[in-house]
């Protein structure tokens, strides 16, 4: 065998070895409870253009970190030098014991929490699971370069998951899968292993625009385009200051996040409940709890009742702001007015302003009720 033949044989052997390793990684991921594993390359040039246009339009709002990290999001090797591939993971979260979302949204006196936040904080669950997958890989190949991410750094999660075949980007900008819809979390492992990539899948949104039409605030301004400044998830979670008055009535009783675009998506008819115990059970009765009860929480109670939950990240002040808005949007009830009055002199100027707005909305409804003809 000459040197050229030997080199070709060595390359073929190396490629076969990496294909076998990739297959083992997928199998290990399944054993660890992930619902799907994919492998993507790091070429995100098209997504980088989209990202820069989105930032230039100011659609990231107050999320300064989106601009601060710049193209590190779209250039994995700039964020983690040496990165050749990204192992992507998907884990379903639909809680098995949650109420039907429509029942909670229809009752203006109860608070709606996005389904992903009803269980344990997903950051902890996914990071631990990904770390175990890294250990499996290390046991097999020895030392290798890697870094684990779970919505915790400048990573274009949906773009990478799309390239690796875990789904396609829906018109609401979330990842969609024909098998399980969109009720899942994503995680990534940046690695220097030259693994073969898994093929992307075709998109299947067609002419459907249910997500655009269902968005309460019109945040999905066009297919595949989201203006975060109008998104209820942004307004109730990311926004630190006052919620724009024009958008407050549109928030309804959503006190942490919003699921409307997912709830109407036809592909979510195929979604199954999670197999992960940490996501299956609703924590501390947060699914559809009475708004007046939630508003009466002290800061200590808030911290205790949100321990281990994603809700804790917004803090007590923004939590109180959100619940005050929902109380303002509720149908008139004397108990709601009484609850709001208990915090009319709240130490937080942000909370006081939203309480005053909510009281004004309740007063309008009380006046309308009094003026309405009886019988």
Image: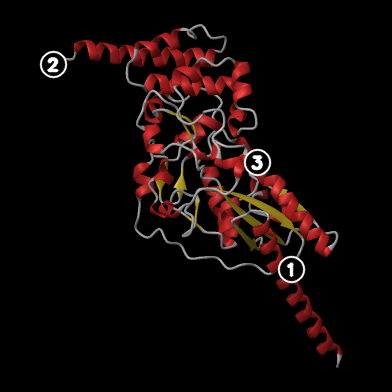
- Residue at the image position 55 percent from the left and 16 percent from the top: 297
- Residue hosting label 1: 21
For residue 79, say whether it is visible: no
Which quadrant, please, contains the N terminus? bottom right
Residue 263 horizontal/vertical position (percent): 41, 44
- Closer-to-camera residue (124/175): 124
Q: Which residue is mark 3?
A: 123
Tell me which numbered mark, 1 or 3, is placed earlier along the sequence.
1
* Residue 94, placed above or below residue 368: below
Kindly state the secondary structure of the residue where label 3 is placed: helix
Depth check: give the residue in front, 362 or 309.
309
Q: Which mark is residue 375?
A: 2
Q: Can residue 305 be seen in this snapshot?
A: yes
Q: In x, y percent, where is residue 89? A: 63, 55
Is the Cβ of the residue at disc 2 closer than 8 Å to that at disc 1?
Answer: no
Crowding at label 3, few (<14), some or many (≥20) Cα neighbours within 10 Å? some
Picture residue at 52% right of the left edge, 42% below the top: 95
Where in the figure is residue 160, as x and y percent of width and height?
60, 57
Distance between the alpha carbons at the discs numbered 2 and 3? 54 Å
> Is the Cβ of the residue at disc 2 closer than 8 Å to that at disc 3?
no
The quarter holding residue 112 reads top left
In the image, is residue 258 above or below residue 134? above
């Amino acid at each position: 065998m000459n040197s050229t033949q030997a080199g070709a044989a060595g390359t073929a052997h190396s490629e076969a070895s990496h294909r076998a390793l990739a297959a083992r990684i997928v199998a290990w991921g399944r054993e660890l409870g992930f619902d799907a594993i994919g492998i993507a390359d790091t070429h995100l040039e098209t997504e980088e253009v989209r990202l820069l246009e989105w930032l230039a339009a100011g659609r990231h709002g107050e999320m300064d970190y989106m601009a601060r990290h710049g193209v590190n999001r779209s250039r994995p090797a700039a964020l983690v030098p040496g990165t050749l591939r990204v192992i992507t993971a998907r884990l379903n979260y639909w809680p098995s014991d949650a109420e039907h979302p429509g029942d909670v949204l229809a009752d203006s006196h109860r608070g709606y929490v996005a389904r992903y936040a009803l269980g344990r904080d997903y950051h902890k669950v996914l990071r631990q699971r990904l770390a175990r997958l890294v250990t499996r890989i290390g046991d097999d190949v020895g030392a290798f370069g890697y870094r684990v991410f779970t919505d915790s750094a400048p990573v274009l999660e949906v773009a990478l998951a799309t390239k690796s075949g875990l789904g396609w980007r829906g018109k609401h900008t979330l990842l969609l899968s024909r098998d399980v819809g969109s009720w899942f979390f994503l995680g990534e492992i940046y690695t220097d292993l030259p693994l073969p990539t898994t093929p992307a899948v075709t998109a299947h949104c067609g002419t459907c625009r249910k997500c655009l039409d269902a968005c309460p605030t019109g945040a999905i301004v066009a297919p595949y385009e989201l203006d975060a400044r109008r998104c209820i998830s942004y307004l109730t979670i990311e926004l630190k200051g006052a919620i724009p008055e024009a958008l407050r009535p549109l928030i309804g009783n959503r006190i942490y996040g919003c699921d409307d675009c997912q709830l109407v998506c036809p592909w979510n008819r195929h979604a199954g409940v999670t197999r992960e115990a940490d996501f299956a059970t609703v924590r501390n009765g947060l699914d559809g709890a009475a708004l007046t009860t939630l508003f009466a929480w002290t800061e200590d109670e808030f911290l205790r009742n949100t321990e281990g939950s994603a809700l804790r990240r917004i803090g007590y002040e923004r939590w109180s702001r959100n619940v005050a808005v929902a109380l303002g949007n509720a149908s008139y009830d004397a108990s709601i007015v009484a609850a709001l009055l208990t915090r009319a002199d709240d130490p937080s100027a942000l909370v006081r302003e939203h309480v005053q707005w909510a009281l004004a909305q309740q007063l309008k409804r009380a006046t309308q009720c009094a003026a309405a003809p009886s019988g």
